[in-house]
Image (cartoon, rainbow, N blue to C red):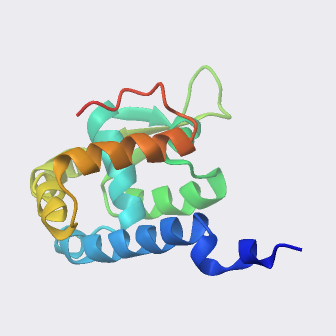
C-alpha cells in the first residue's frame, strides 16, 4: 500500500484549505471596519454587482447552500443592508434586493481589494494564474476571469 498518499504534505486539499483560512483571517480587520463578516462581504459583492438576485442564484454564485444563506441573509436584513421578498410569479423563490444602506456600504468597501492585494505575497500575473487555476478546479474555466 502506498501510504505516502496519506501524508498531509502530499495533499492538494490541505494548502487550499489553509490558504483559504489565512486569506479570510487577513480580510477580518478590513471587514471589521465596515461591520461585515467574510461571508456577508461576498454576499454584498453579489448584491453590489446585481442589485437584486434570488437566494438560489446567490447560493450558486457563492457555492453556499440555502441552510447557510438563510440565517446570513436574515441577519443582513435585520442590519438594513438588504430586503428579502417572495417572488410574485413563484412564492417558493425568495428575492434579495440591495437596500440604500447596503449600497452606501459599497463606498466604504471599495478600498478592501487593493488593501488585501498588499497583504498577499503574489504579483498580478501570479494572481491571475492562481485565479484561473482555482476556477478550473471549481469547474468554471469558461467563466470570464480577465480582470
Please state if 106 lies on the left or on the right of 28 as rendered: left
Q: Position of residue 101 (x, y in %)?
A: 20, 52
Residue 60 visible from this viewpoint? yes
Residue at 42 percent across and 70 percent down: it is 19
Q: Position of residue 57 (x, y in %)?
A: 53, 35
Please state if 49 lies on the left or on the right of 11 as rendered: left
- Residue 120 in which image quadrant: bottom left
Q: Up-down: is 39 above or below 2?
A: above
Q: Up-down: is 91 above or below 74?
A: above
Residue sitting farthest toward the top: 89
- Residue 25 in which image quadrant: bottom left
Q: Position of residue 26 (x, y in %)?
A: 27, 74
Residue 98 visible from this viewpoint? no
Nearest the viewer among 7 and 27 is 7
Residue at 21 percent across and 45 percent down: it is 125
- Residue 114 in which image quadrant: bottom left
Residue at 68 percent across and 35 percent down: it is 92
Nearest the viewer among 25 and 117 is 117
Residue sitting farthest toward the right: 1
Q: Quadrant of the C terminus?
A: top left
Q: Position of residue 68 (x, y in %)?
A: 59, 60
Please state if 76 lies on the left or on the right of 128 as rendered: right
How many marks can you see? 0
Residue at 34 percent across and 41 percent down: it is 47
Q: Quadrant of the N terminus?
A: bottom right
Amino acid at each position: 500500500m502506498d501510504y505516502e498518499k496519506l501524508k498531509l504534505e502530499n495533499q492538494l486539499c490541505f494548502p487550499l484549505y489553509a490558504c483559504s483560512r489565512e486569506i479570510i483571517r487577513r480580510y477580518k480587520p478590513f471587514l471589521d471596519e465596515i461591520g461585515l463578516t467574510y461571508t456577508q462581504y461576498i454576499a454584498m459583492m453579489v448584491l453590489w454587482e446585481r442589485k437584486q438576485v434570488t437566494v438560489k442564484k446567490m447560493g450558486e454564485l457563492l457555492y453556499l447552500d440555502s441552510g447557510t444563506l438563510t440565517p446570513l441573509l436574515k441577519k443582513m436584513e435585520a442590519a438594513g443592508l438588504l430586503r428579502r421578498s417572495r417572488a410574485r410569479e413563484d412564492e417558493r423563490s425568495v428575492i434579495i434586493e440591495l437596500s440604500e444602506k447596503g449600497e452606501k456600504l459599497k463606498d466604504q468597501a471599495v478600498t478592501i481589494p487593493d488593501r488585501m492585494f498588499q497583504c498577499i505575497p503574489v504579483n498580478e500575473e501570479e494572481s491571475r494564474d492562481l485565479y484561473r487555476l482555482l476556477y478550473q478546479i471549481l469547474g468554471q474555466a469558461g467563466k470570464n476571469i480577465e480582470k
